[in-house]
Image (spheres, grey):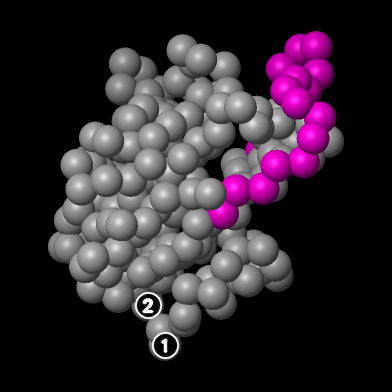
Amino acid sequence: MRLPALLLVLLAAGCSGSPDVVQHVPAAAGGPDGPAGAVTLSGSGEFAAGNTAAIAYDRRLAPSGAQASLKAESTGGTTRTSLVVEGFVPNRRYGAHLHTGACATDPEASGPHYQHHPGQVTPSSEVWLDFKTDASGAGRATARHEWALDPAALPKSLVIHAQPTKKKGEQAGTAGPRIACLTLS
């Protein structure tokens, strides 16, 4: 069953089931930091030809009909980010991160990972939303951080990668080639 992108947004905002991956990162010593105001980011769309807000770079891993919806809400020193996807390759793991630049035809245009603490490639500084699809190609992930998004320096895209994020070692934070990009606003 294929869901419209708007329904994906509603699912991301109020999904009652538990996601495949929940990342909760406690605050660093000294408590939460960042602006106190509420910030909401979102993006949704089908990775279709001609869609500049949802771009597929690898049709083998983001097939025709694949779509995603992301919502990030930041308030009271906490940021919660939810991702819902469908139409991807069934029973497969993907990496997904927030990035600093908007999507473009060049996969590298979305820039590096968004980092709350610049220079720190860790799940406590970045938003990692790795997911595993089910038998129908749907998946979801949620991350919670004890810091607020800075309205002056917001992430501009979600990039879906070909592999799950490496958690340790020299390659920590890497997740293989960029296969799809969703612009956030």
- The numbered disc on residue 136 is 2
Q: Is residue 149 left or right of residue 32?
A: left
Q: What element does badge 2 sit on?
A: loop
Residue 23, located in which quarter of the rendered image? Answer: top right
Q: Amino acid at mark 2?
A: Ser
Q: Is residue 157 left or right of residue 23?
A: left
**The stretch drawn in magenta includes residue 37:** yes
Image x and y of residue 179, in percent? 24, 50
Whichever of labels 2 and 1 marks the residue nearer the N terminus, that label is 1
Please tell me which residue is depicted at 17% across the width and 56% down the height of the picture: 58
Q: Give the distance between the C-alpha atoms of the residues marked 2 and 1, in whole angstroms.
A: 8 Å
- Residue 84 visible in the snapshot: yes
Residue 178 against residue 147 in the figure, above or below: below
* Along the viewing direction, whichever of 24 and 30 lies nearer the viewer: 30
- The numbered disc on residue 179 is none
Q: Main secondary structure of the magenta part?
A: loop
Assess whether mark 1 and mark 2 are in contact (beta carbons under 8 angstroms): yes
* Along the viewing direction, whichever of 185 and 60 lies nearer the viewer: 185
Residue 67, located in which quarter of the rendered image? Answer: bottom left
Residue 185 against residue 76 in the figure, above or below: below
Q: Amino acid at mark 1?
A: Met
* Along the viewing direction, whichever of 6 and 173 lies nearer the viewer: 6
Tell me which segment is drawn in magenta: 24-42
Q: Quadrant of the N terminus?
A: bottom left
Image x and y of residue 82, in percent? 59, 54
Residue 33 against residue 13 in the figure, above or below: above
> Count of labels shown?
2
Q: Is residue 155 left or right of residue 32?
A: left
**Crowding at label 1, few (<14), some or many (≥20) Cα neighbours within 10 Å?**
few
- The numbered disc on residue 1 is 1
- Residue 96 visible in the snapshot: no
